[in-house]
Amino acid sequence: MKRVNQLRARVYDIINSRLNRFAKGPLRDFAKPGFLCFKLTERCNSRCVHCGIWHNTDSGRELSKDDWICIINNLRDWTGPANLVITGGEALLRPDALDLVRHACNVGMVVELLSNGIACDHRVCEQIVLSGVDRITFSLDGITPQTHASIRGIPDNFVCTLEAIENIDKHRKKYRSEIKILLKTVLMRENIHEVIAIGDWITSQGKAEWRIQPIEQNYGERDNPLWYKTSDLWITDLKAVTHLVSELKQRKKDGCPLQNDFQSLDYIASYFANPDTYMRAIQSHNLPGLDWTPPANFEVSAAGDVRFSFMLQPAGNLKDSSPKDIWNRRH
Ligand SMILES: C[S@@+](CC[C@H](N)C(=O)[O-])C[C@H]1O[C@@H](n2cnc3c(N)ncnc32)[C@H](O)[C@@H]1O
């Protein structure tokens, strides 16, 4: 059944990414969201230099477990099996996070859980594997404890993440689970010197895939297209970026499990050379392609607010409207 749901989610993605991008007039009414994402909480136990979400410690406006179950059911009834990313803040700070993951999987959604790995001890990793989640993604921003800690602000984070990868791998073997592990690296000035070593390590371990995301404006801050001009994290050494991209492309040809396609890797170099042109496409995570409109995301905040793009105000709240009604407000 899992395979069938994954296939249906893939078809959903292909159809809706095209409808959202190209359809005009009445045909556009058939389009459903291109990217479904739940931010279960804004609370976070990381202290990242590139993210401001952790400053928000307010759990007062978080939806309850029953609210989320109702949202998952309504969404599934409307979209059918589709890919869903569950994240935060740190989603695993909610004790019911894995119940929600399990429920989403049980009703046929294809789920990716995104975590910093801090709260992923042996027992939690077993629960993650048993939840039925299709992919667990851990952030990995350095290959030395020092670099990872200087970016993520937590001294033990590196060791926790490495242990979490081991534990997931052990449990997936034990339970013959097909859960995939993805490691995600945000490329910035702080870690550019270690990125190749991260990739080589991932290749040598053979346990996980890898994705690189270039640094964007700090999450959780008010949109400012010129943020990079004053950011310490922005990479100004364009030669270093060009060299890195060519090394990454070679590594990918040689078998490094890097998910970014060749064109997206070229975009990384173009982005640092021409941020004004490439900023919005990079922020929309909608590569390859410079076109970041029309907004087609369905990002649900911890309080149930729905945004179609990081830049837009919420179009509604799922506590008082159905997903379909909110989506229809996008015209
Ligand atoms: C907001 S975090 C939430 C998930 C989890 N707590 C974690 O730390 O991975 C989701 C992903 O966004 C990335 N991220 C945060 N701020 C970013 C920024 N300014 N630019 C690019 N990626 C960013 C994080 O590194 C992480 O991979």
Image: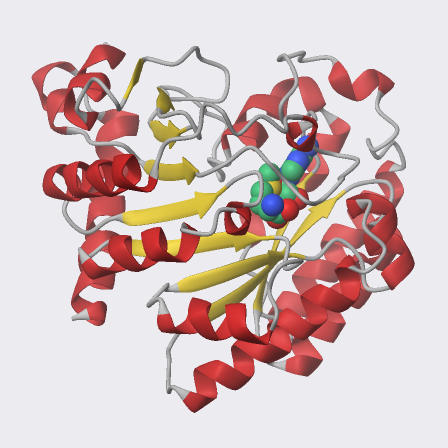
Residue that appears at 70% across and 23% down:
275
Residue 37 picture quarter: top left
Determine the residue located farthest toward the bottom in the rendered image. Answer: 174
Which of the image's four quarters has the N terminus?
Answer: bottom left
Residue 258 picture quarter: bottom right
In the figure, 137 relative to 57: above or below? below
Instruction: Tell which of 286 and 249 is nearer to you.
Output: 286
Q: Is residue 255 left or right of residue 29?
A: right
Quadrant of picture, ligand 1 = top right
In the figure, 209 relative to 56: above or below? below
Instruction: Tell which of 8 and 270 is nearer to you.
Output: 8
Residue 248 picture quarter: bottom right
Q: Position of residue 107 (x, y in %)?
A: 17, 55
Q: Position of residue 152 (x, y in %)?
A: 78, 46
Q: Position of residue 56 (x, y in %)?
A: 64, 26
Which of the image's four quarters has the C terminus?
Answer: top left
Q: Is residue 310 left or right of residue 104?
A: right
Residue that appears at 64% across and 53% down:
116
How many labels sit on residues? 0
Q: Position of residue 312 (x, y in %)?
A: 44, 13
> How was the colour assigned to the protein in this rendering?
secondary structure
State whether residue 285 appears in this view.
Answer: yes
In the figure, 139 relative to 77: above or below? below
